[in-house]
Every structure is written in structure tokens, then in C-alpha cells.
Amino acid sequence: MRKTILFLITSSVLLYVYSLACMGGQQQKGIEDKTIELDAATKAKIIDKVAETVSEKYVFPEIGKKVADYIRKRLKEKAYGSITSMDVLTKEQTKDIQTISHDLHMGVTARGKGPMRKAPPEIQWSERYLKWQRFQNYGFKKVDRLLGNVGFIALDEFVFPEMDGKNVAKETAKAAMTMIKDCYALIIDLRDNFGGREEMALLLLSYLFE
């Protein structure tokens, strides 16, 4: 049985939000088919679940509640009444969330394909996250020693150093800092960095400050 998976992305959490409704006759379509048609009941359940998750999980509870109240108010006003596709719904939800929260890190997007495995959402997220981060070298886009013995680190994301007591990006970070430890100067390029975990920021800072 296929279910819609919504990724609610915030500045501090990445949450799976499962719609409570199956897609009826549309079950056989992959969720990447963003033209999939939504009926009113399915939309209401998805929107309510997004509101519930923001209210419960957002890092600033007061703002999370304001966002949830606004989304539910928009639903009652039938603001989403003419929306029939998942793609349009997620874009409209993201716009409404950011209107109230002013947090451009937070939004909703639909992903996934095929039957869901029986693993809990948190486990599924961890597996996807770790696989993606390995591909991205845990945010360390480039580590180099430039002419004049100048260290250079291009860091595109502050990734979890550890997760559940197991190494994620910690060893990669240590290797990067070891490579530049004897440099006369250091450039850290954060131009493409979109944020991440403060634990990684503090780990890197520990090499530079008492």
C-alpha cells in the first residue's frame, strides 16, 4: 500500500509527515508523479498533519503554533480548495509556512516511491540522510593547501558529527582539520553553506579557539 510521504524541513529538524489517507485509485502511481490528483479529504488530512507536526516539533513552540493556526485557518477558508496536485499543494504549504515563520529553511515537499518499508520513519530518514551525506563527503566540498601554506576548506553544510553515538562526519572533520593544522592561515569558504548542526560548528571551532 503506497502512502504519501511529506518531508517537513525546518532549520533544526527533518521530519517525515505521513498522510493518513491512501491515494485511492491513484495508488499505483509513484509519488514523483507530481500531477497526482488530490481529493478534498486527502488534502485536509495532509494539511492537518503538517500543521500538527509544525506545532509539536518546531524549534520555537510559539511560532510553531502560529504557523499551525494559520494553516488550519487557511484550510477553513478553503484557500486550498482549487488545488488538485501534490506539487501545487506542497508549494502553497511552504509559502504559507514561511509567511508566518519567516524561516526560509522550512518547507514541505513530497518524495519517495513504491511501497513503504516497515521501518519507523526515523530509521528511514537516518538511512537516507547517511547515504546522501556520504555522497556529499559530509559537507566538506574541498580541503586544500594553497600556495603560501594557506589552508582552504569549502564547507557546504554542518553535518552531524555523530548520530546515536556512531560516527557520521566527525572523522571526516578531524581529517580535514589535521590536513590544514600546520598552515600559516586558513580560509573557510561558507558561500554555499545553508546551515546545519551546531555540534559540527563547535567541533571545528574547538580546533581554532580555547
Image (tube, rainbow, N blue to C red):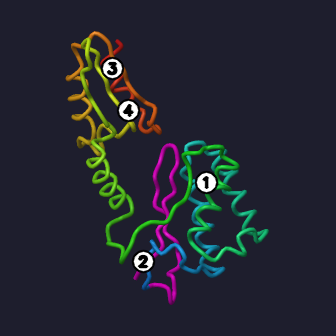
What's the residue type where badge 2 is placed?
Gly
Q: Secondary structure at mark 1?
A: helix
Q: Which residues are magenta?
A: 1-27
The C terminus is located in which quarter?
top left
Secondary-structure class at tag 3: loop
State how many labels appear. Answer: 4
Residue 69 vertical placement versus 194 (above, below)? below
Q: Residue at x 48, y 75 (%)?
A: 33
Label 2 sits on a secondary structure element that is loop
Nearer-N-terminus badge (1/3):
1
Badge nearest the viewer, 4 or 2: 2
Return the mark for residue 199: 4
The location of residue 175, given as percent across then percent down, is 20, 29
User: Which residue carries the number 3 mark?
Assistant: 206
* Residues packed near mark 3 inside 10 Å, few (<14), some (14 to 19) or many (20 plus): few
Left or right: residue 102 versus residue 192 is right
